Amino acid sequence: MKYYDFDVWIGGQTGDHYETRARSESMGENQGRLLPAALDQTYAAAEKLSSGDVDDAFLKQVGGSLFTALFDGAIGVLYHQALGQVYADDSAGVRIRLRIEPPELAALPWELLYDSGRDCFLATSTETLLTRYIELPKPIRELQTSLPIRILAIIPGGSGLDTTQEMRTIQDAVTGLQNTLEIKVLEGKVTSDDISRQLVDHQFHIIHFIGHGGFLKEKGCLVLNSEQGDEPDLISAKEFSYFFQNYPCMKLVVLNSCSGAQSSTRSLTGVAQELVAMGIPAVVAMRKKITDEGAKLFAENFYLNLCRGNEQGRVDIAV
């Protein structure tokens, strides 16, 4: 499919509102404003998401509130104009790219954006792909690469997760692609030095991390194994991103860990954000806690679509 970019910027607060701007690749540009009061209920509802005790109606309520607040006025008109164009072409869609500057707004679950008129969550429709973008002073490297694609699965020991089943689902999804895709599994006691050696010895294109993530003093981190003893080793987002500072072949990092994409009140403190800042073209991560079953389900369908679907190689469509 051909996708027309629809970029949405949310800038800093000016007086009683946040400045917003949208640019459609095919329909032009409009400006708007986002009122903080329109998000009051969303802030409160977002806290409930972490509990997991939510249903479809609740998700639609939160996503609908976000949609109404963002696609208000002229920006909403531009959004519907862009959608109208793709409705006339079954082979076209809109790629919505969110560029959110204020950290307090970036922390909201924009992935739940729900268009009640279409009865559709934007992120689950191939008509409206939804991606977060971070403004960076340097260009992002090309996502395309030559075959075979090499995946390094990093699975630190002691996580308590059903990592065996998740790896099996990934391997099943890529069955029959041995000539174009190779998987190496680094598991058991996995230390920082182990990862570093693997990246020195081999050229990988995809990292798939299965484990735990979180925050330490408002800084994103991942849980690895310590060189000494059985204590976990918390590696900061910045330290993890340094693995790829001089590693241009890396194209995609999948963090199948809780809170891998969450940012604190400061910008670029989540693991995903630091990886993007280091120049990784695409990062897939979870913003909130997820169940073990949910992680396995996502991994299976993500790699199935990435490697075997009609739009294989398209990360945002696979998501």
Image (cartoon, helix red, strand yellow):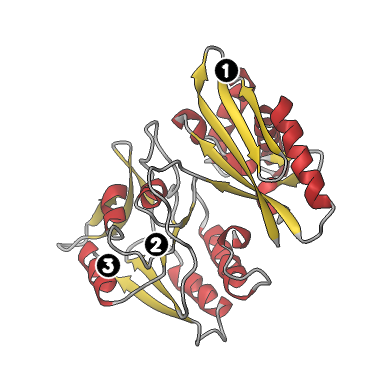
Badge number at residue 160: 2
In percent of the image, x 72 and y 54: which residue is there? 93
For marks 3 and 2, the one nearer the N-term is 2
Nearest the viewer among 161 and 266 is: 266
Mark nearest the camera among 1 and 2 is: 1
Q: x, y percentage for residue 142?
A: 46, 62
Q: Residue at x 37, y 32 (%)?
A: 266
Where is residue 129? Give x, y as percent.
65, 51
Residue 278 appears at what percent x and percent y? 34, 52
In the displayed structure, 179 sits above or below 39; it is below
Residue 41 shown left or right of residue 199 in the figure: right
Quarter that holds the N terminus: bottom right
Spatial CA span between label 3 and label 2: 20 Å
Is residue 189 visible in the rendered structure shown here? Answer: no
**Real-space Cα separation, disc 3 to disc 1, in angstroms:** 45 Å
Q: Nearer the viewer, mark 3 or mark 2?
A: 3
Local packing at callout 1 (Cα closer than 10 Å; few below 14, some 14-19, many 20+) is some
Residue designated by label 3: 195
Of residues 157 and 133, the one nearer the viewer is 133
The image quarter containing residue 155 is: bottom left
* Residue at mark 1: 17
For marks 3 and 1 on the same chain, the one whose residue lies earlier in the sequence: 1
Q: Which type of secondary structure does the marked residue at label 2 adopt? A: loop
Q: What residue sits 75% from the left and 46% below the top?
A: 120
Determine which quarter of the picture holds residue 216. Answer: top left
**Amino acid type at mark 3:** Ile
For the view shown, which residue lies furthest in the left direction? 228
